[in-house]
Structure formats: structure tokens, C-alpha cells
């Protein structure tokens, strides 16, 4: 039995999704980049490349069993999906945006009949309905930022990452409707099949091991034996550091440990102060706890 996984074929989520699969040990083979579907027989997996916007619908319909797409896309599709895990990339926010010279300070300052250009009509309508404003939703396909300038709309609702595009187009945010990350989704239907569920969870766990490793570093150092108790406080590791004897050297021991990536600078500095030598830090590809 083969499970089908969908990932975005292009756009802001594609590159990182491919990287996660590759680091997780899922070899997409030589046809990657040319073929829209790749079968990986040794894993009972077929990877299908489709538009991010189509993935929620494909999962819900059963065309694929699970896939990677943004929370914003899933919300816009209105599909009934099961969130397997947040993949912690592709972060953005979906905002209500007005011309920078507007006197509007909050979306609640807007009046009934306001025209809102967006590529996310479902999310936008639900938001304005929720705050009690009767907005006219203008559905556009891309480049919503130009719509107020052209007179097509009064304001827009759109995805924002850094805000640079808004500033360039003399726009500003007044409210955040939702935040969004890339996530791994499945469906109740797929997860009711025991064999599919086991395979989906296996691949999800492999991806999680890559994400967990990305936030860690592997540290190795030769430290004075007399300072070992102090070293253990600096590099506690997952279940404590690994301490190894060094052949022909009774005064030093080798210490190996996993540390948080953000702490690497401080760890190296503190080890050096204790007289450690040969300090090495290395990236970790996968970490299974």
C-alpha cells in the first residue's frame, strides 16, 4: 500500500519542503524538478507536486493522504483537515491593509460598503462578518497592493512577511486577521486506515526529527578532568553529556553533548574559560529522542 503526499510545486513553501524531505532521508531521485509525481517504492510513498492552494482540497477529497501547505491556504479552502504538525517555516500574517495616508487606525473604523481587494475572499469575508462590517469583497488574482491606487478597491487584505512591499506601495497594516506557518496536514479519512496512519506518522516523525535537529548543535571538547562537574552544568545535553576517556591523557576527558543552537556561542566561551581544548561544534541532520 502506497500513501500519497502533496507538496507545493513552487512558491515560498516549495524549497524548504524539499529540503525537509531530503534531510529526513526521503530521496526524490534524479527526476525531481521535472516530474509532477515521484514514486519511492522502498518507503511506500508517492510525492506529488501541486499548487499549494489545491493541497487542502486534494487532502479532503482523498486524492492525496497528507501534504504540506500554509495555514492561510487551508483556512481559505475551508477544508476539514487534521493538523499533524507545525513545520515552523513560511511564517507570515494575513492583514487588513489601508493606504498609508488613510485616517483609519483599526479595521473597526471602516464603514459598511468598504471595498476590499484580496486573493483570500473566504477569510476576508469571515473576518468582516465577525466584526460586523458589510464589506464588498473584490476577488483578485495577485498584485492586490495596486488595487487601491487603481481605484478598484478602498483597502486590501493580504499576506505580509516583512512589510517591505507595503511600504514600497505606500500601504500600512491596521489589523492582523491571522498568522500562518507551513504545516503538515492529513484527513480523518486517511488516518482511519491503520496502515496509512502508521506510514503517515512515520514520515511525520522523520520530518520532526529534522526540525528538532535544526535548532541544535553537537559540541565536542577535551576538558580538564578536574573541571568535569562544572562542564556538566555548561553542557547538560539531552540526558547528560557523554564523557569519554582519552588514550594516553589522564588529565583530560572528551565531552560530547547536544546544545541549543542559540546557546552555542556562550557554551564555547564558557568551555574555553574552563581550559577546554579542541572545541568543535557541528550541525545535526536529524535528532530522534
Image (cartoon, rainbow, N blue to C red):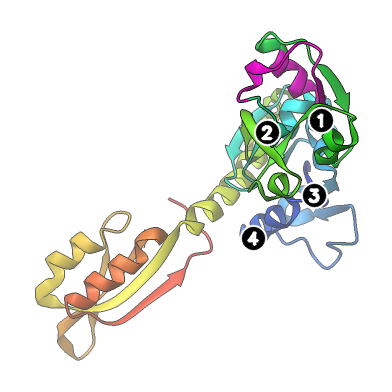
**141 to the left or right of 170:** right
Of the numbered discs 2 and 3, the one sitting upstream in the chain is 3
Q: Is 120 a magenta residue?
A: yes
From the viewer's perspective, is residue 138 above or below residue 278?
above
Reading the image, the residue beneath label 3 is: 47
Which residue occupies the foreground of this view, 248 or 82?
A: 82
Name which residue lies at 78% across and 32% down: 56
Provide the secondary structure element on which disc 3 rests.
strand
Of the numbered discs 2 and 1, the one sitting upstream in the chain is 2
Q: Label 2 vs label 3: CA separation?
A: 29 Å
From the viewer's perspective, is residue 87 above or below residue 16?
above
Reading the image, the residue beneath label 2 is: 94
Which residue occupies the foreground of this view, 67 or 165?
A: 165
Density class for disc 3 (Cα within 10 Å; few <14, some 14-19, many ≥20) is many
Provide the secondary structure element on which disc 2 rests.
strand
Q: Label 4 vs label 2: CA separation?
A: 33 Å
Frontmost of labels 4 and 2 is 2
Amino acid at each position: 500500500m502506497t500513501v500519497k503526499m502533496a507538496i507545493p510545486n513552487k512558491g515560498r513553501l516549495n524549497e524548504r519542503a524539499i529540503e525537509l524531505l531530503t534531510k529526513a532521508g526521503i530521496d526524490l531521485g534524479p527526476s525531481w524538478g521535472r516530474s509532477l509525481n515521484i514514486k519511492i517504492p522502498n518507503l511506500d510513498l508517492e510525492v506529488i507536486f501541486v499548487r499549494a492552494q489545491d493541497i487542502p482540497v486534494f487532502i479532503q477529497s482523498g486524492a492525496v493522504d497528507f501534504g504540506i501547505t500554509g495555514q492561510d491556504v487551508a483556512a481559505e479552502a475551508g477544508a476539514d483537515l487534521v493538523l499533524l504538525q507545525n513545520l515552523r517555516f513560511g511564517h507570515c500574517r494575513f492583514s487588513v491593509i489601508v493606504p498609508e495616508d488613510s485616517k483609519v487606525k483599526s479595521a473597526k473604523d471602516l464603514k459598511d460598503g468598504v471595498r476590499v481587494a484580496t486573493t483570500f475572499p473566504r477569510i476576508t469575508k469571515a473576518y468582516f462578518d465577525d466584526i460586523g462590517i458589510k464589506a464588498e469583497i473584490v476577488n483578485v488574482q495577485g498584485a492586490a497592493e495596486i488595487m487601491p491606487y487603481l481605484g478598484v478597491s478602498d483597502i486590501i487584505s493580504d499576506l505580509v512577511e516583512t512589510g517591505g512591499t507595503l511600504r514600497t506601495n505606500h500601504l500600512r497594516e491596521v489589523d492582523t486577521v491571522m498568522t500562518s506557518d507551513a504545516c503538515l496536514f492529513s484527513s480523518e479519512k486517511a488516518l482511519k486506515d491503520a496502515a496509512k496512519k502508521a506510514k503517515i506518522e512515520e514520515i511525520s516523525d522523520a520530518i520532526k526529527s529534522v526540525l528538532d535537529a535544526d535548532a541544535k548543535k553537537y559540541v565536542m571538547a577535551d576538558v580538564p578532568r578536574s573541571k568535569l562537574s562544572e562542564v556538566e552544568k555548561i553542557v547538560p545535553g539531552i540526558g547528560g553529556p557523554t564523557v569519554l576517556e582519552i588514550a594516553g591523557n589522564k588529565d583530560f576527558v572528551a565531552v560530547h553533548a547536544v546544545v541549543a543552537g542559540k546557546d552555542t556561542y556562550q557554551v564555547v566561551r564558557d568551555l574555553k574559560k574552563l581550559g577546554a581544548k579542541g572545541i568543535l561544534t557541528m550541525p545535526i541532520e536529524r535528532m530522534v529522542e
